[in-house]
Image (cartoon, grey):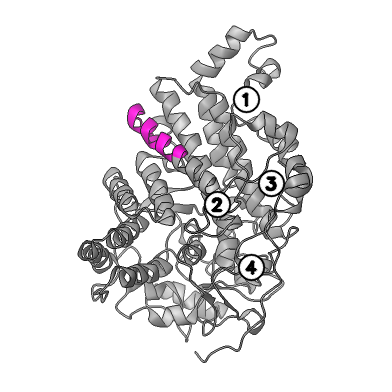
Amino acid sequence: MNKIHRYLVPAMIAATVMPSCSDIDTNPLAENVTESQKEQVKTENPDMALAGVTGVCALFNVFNSIMDRHLDFGYPSVMLMSDSRGVDMISPNSGYNWFAEAAEMGCCNTTSDTSQEVWGICYNQIFAANAVLSGIDPATDDPTLQFFMAQALAFRAFDYLILAQTYQFTYKGHENDPCVMLITEKNQEQVAADGCLRSSVQQTYDMIMDDLNRSVSLLQSSGLRPEQIINSSPKRFISLAVAYGLRARANLIMQNWAAAAEDAANAIASFSGSPYSRTQVSAPGFISLADNSWMWGIPVAETDRTVTSGIVNFPSHMGSLNYGYASVGAYRKVNRALFDRIPESDVRKGWFLDAASQSPNLPENFQAYVDGQKIPPFAQVKFAPYQNVLGTDNNASDIPLMRVEEMYLIQAEATAMSGNLPGGKQILEQFVTTYRDPAFSSQASSAEELQDETFFQRRVELWGEGITFYDFLRLNKDLDRRGGGWPTEWCYDVKAGSNVLRLPIPNTEVQGNEAFRTAGNNNPGAPIPSPVTDTDY
């Protein structure tokens, strides 16, 4: 791996993750530690494993870990980067828009901030997960240690799933193409010494699935739930339902339709919550890990450095109703063509201001705030300000990583694509009519049409949550921004399979990874796309 990752990251996270055996001699556990004592620490110290897993969670919300820039605040930065590269989340070409490089699609080169951020953030979390796994005997029958091992495996699989979709085209049809470097607790020392080449897409997904299979199995055998391990924000940890959900995502990408449907159903059955009701989403929200529909997320505290920074955080860049970069001009808007397709009977249309900057979902004082601030048409009002305090500069909102609604949509698509169109239609109709639009009725007459209907539902339901761009790639959809309200210079029609849709591995890795520098094969760079003539709204 690159030198920054090889040498600095282990030092930075040493206080929060469980050390490898080679580090224990100098760890404050003792002045002198024998080989026997090392093995005892490795296999019998759940407190250290807990610290390690908590450390991985902390890396999801970390201030300026990759670069000293206002776009670097942990995994939510990756969410904003991916959505900015897509079609549905429009942002202005403005000095206040720290994600302009991604929106411009000017990131397809080895020195882009976007590529460095995605690569660095995901591999930092992978290294931390590997440190946890290095400290646990894989054959342990201790339920608590099994639980912690399951956490690290699932975290690692999550990060590799993001990397695989960012640095190579989708799984199907690209199984033999080069993907990313696979670093585990077993080979990390060799990689640090000799470097590492890219594994294939097939090998990468094989490892993702192996990690998730092991995570599910360990959580089942452990029998422990996150709330039994940690009192504060237990949904930061991976539950059995979340492990099923992550495997459902992976199977969906791989087009393992029946397995994806089964995993989504198991995720729903294992989860104690339920989707947001129509009433609950009839006002700005999506800011609390405690919400009943959230399966997994990032807890954010008022004392976190991302929050005390004031503006280096997700709500600053996303929020229309709080203070931050968005509120001074870099508003995030919905694609106009997508907005127009949302029926008036669908409560989610009110997640965005209309052409007159009005929303039926806004309480009177919220609408007055919108009017007073002159917030532009089609700006998002899905995400509430922290504690519903309008204009607040305290941006301590939690960040969603998985909601149960997604599982219903995976189950619907995968059920239809596995050969059961009536079953898929029933799942989709029941979800949408119950929770979002009572007038909805599927018009699909084929599995592919049902897949497209579900794709639309996903675009609306998961808007702004860092998922939609990967759906476009997974389904080989063109990224056509015409009619969406994009800035003229960023109005593109990018065809599926274009090189601009996968990032080159960053130069820091190329230079720091000896094996890759001498014999590696990077993705080709691509110029910024040429703008096309926009269509009328």
Residue at 46 percent across and 30 percent down: it is: 148
Relative to residue 138, is residue 121 drawn left or right? right
Residue 381 visible in rendering = yes
Q: Amino acid at mark 2?
A: Asn
Work out which quarter of the rendered image holds the N terminus and state it: top right
In this view of the protein, which residue sits in the foreground, 529 or 128? 529
CA gap, disc 1 and disc 3: 20 Å
Report which residue position mark 1 lands on.
19
Relative to residue 521, is residue 242 drawn left or right? left
Mark identifier at residue 500: 4
Q: Earlier in the sequence, mark 1 or mark 4?
A: 1
Q: Earlier in the sequence, mark 1 or mark 3?
A: 1
Q: Earlier in the sequence, mark 2 or mark 1?
A: 1
In contact (CB < 8 Å): disc 2 and disc 1: no
Which span is picked out in magenta?
210-227
> Which residue is situated farthest in the bottom direction here?
536
Q: Is residue 127 above or below residue 115?
A: above
In this view of the protein, which residue sits in the foreground, 202 or 325? 202
Report helix, strand or loop for mark 3.
Answer: loop
Q: Earlier in the sequence, mark 4 or mark 2?
A: 2
Residue 33, percent across and down? 65, 10
Residue 275, percent across and down? 31, 57
CA gap, disc 3 and disc 2: 33 Å
Label 4 crowd (10 A; few <14 / some 14-19 / many >=20): many
Report which residue position mark 3 lands on.
65
Q: Amino acid at mark 3?
A: Ser
Query: Which label sits in the foreground, 4 or 2?
Result: 2
Report which residue position mark 2 lands on.
176
